[in-house]
Amino acid sequence: MLFSTIIHSKAVKKMNEDIYFAIIGDIISSKKITDRNKIQKELKDVMAGINRQYADEIASDFVITLGDEFQGLLKSATLLLEILDRIKFELEPIEIRFGIGIGRIETEINRKSSVGADGPAYWCARRAINIIHSNNDYNISKVAVEIENEKFADVVNLINESLHVCDYMEKHWRKTQKTLIKESVLRFGHDTKIPQKELAVLLNTSAPALNLRIQSSGYYNYLRTKKSICDVLQKIGNE
C-alpha cells in the first residue's frame, strides 16, 4: 500500500482529541454561474445529506459560509476523501476545489455548524485552497492538504503529489469511465468490493464490458491510493 512504510503506528495509540481535519470547499468560476440560487439550494441539499450519512465522522456539520464556499470539520480522516468525492459528484457539472487542514481548533466546536470555528486546522485548509489557486497546473489539481505540524511537511508534499495524480487520472477519464466511477462512488463509496453485476445492470451494460471499463480507467488504483492517503492522514492526526 502507498505510504505504508512512511509512518508506523505506535503500540500505544495516543489520543489527541484536539486534532481535527478541516475542509473548505470552493466553487470554481462561481461568478460565471447564471442561476446562483439554484446552485446554492443544491449545495445546501448536498451538505445536509453528507451531514446525515457521515454523522459519526463529523465534529461540526458542513455548512455554506459564503455564496460560493462551504466548510466542515471531521474527527477522523478515515472517510475524508470519500466524502469529498461524494460532494464533487453530487454537484456535477459544478466543479469544486477542496482545501484540507490538519490541526487544532482553538474555539468552541458547535456540532450543528462549523461557522465561527477557528484555529490552525482551518488556517491550514485556507492555505491549501490558496495553494491550488496559485499553482499553475492547467486547472488539474482540485484537492490539497496542509498541516499544522511542520515535521510532516515531506509526507504532506508526497500526499499532495499523489492527490495531483488522482486529479490527473480523473481529468483524462472518458465519459463512460467517469459515469461508471460516479455511480460507483455515490452508491458504494470507496469500497473496492463493488458488486459489478449490480453496477452493470444500472449502467445498462454487460459485466465483461463493465470490467474492461474499470480496468482501463485505473479505478481500483485510484481508490487504493485515496484510501492509503486517508490512512496516512489519520496516522498523522494520531501523532
Image (cartoon, rainbow, N blue to C red):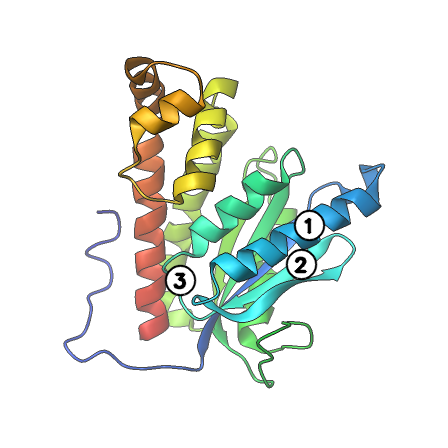
Q: Residue at x 54, y 80 (%)?
A: 105
Q: CA distance from mark 2 to mark 3?
A: 18 Å
Estimate the x, y position of residue 186 in percent, counting from the top left: 47, 40
Name the kind of residue labelled 3 in the image.
Ala
Estimate the x, y position of residue 123 in percent, counting from the top left: 60, 70
Q: Describe the element under mark 3 as helix, strand or loop.
A: loop
User: Decide: marks 3, 1 in contact (CB < 8 A)?
Assistant: no
Disc 1 packing (10 Å; few <14; some 14–19; many ≥20): many
Q: Nearer the viewer, residue 48 or 180?
A: 48
Disc 3 packing (10 Å; few <14; some 14–19; many ≥20): many
Q: CA distance from mark 3 to mark 1?
A: 22 Å
Q: Please report whichever mark, 3 or 1, sits nearer to the chain's N-terminal start.
A: 1
Q: Please report whichever mark, 2 or 3, sits nearer to the chain's N-terminal start.
A: 2
What residue sits right under mark 3 in the picture? 77
Estimate the x, y position of residue 43 in percent, counting from the top left: 68, 50
Q: Describe the element under mark 1 as helix, strand or loop.
A: helix
What residue sits right under mark 1 in the picture? 43
User: Decide: marks 1, 2 in contact (CB < 8 A)?
Assistant: yes
Q: CA distance from mark 1 to mark 2?
A: 9 Å
What residue sits right under mark 2 in the picture? 70
Q: Describe the element under mark 2 as helix, strand or loop.
A: strand
On the picture, is 128 further left or further right than 41? left
Name the kind of residue labelled 1 in the image.
Leu
Q: Is 51 above or below relative to 91?
A: below
Quadrant occupied by the C terminus = bottom left
On the picture, is 50 further left or further right than 77? right
Name the kind of residue labelled 2 in the image.
Phe
Residue 192: quarter of image: top left
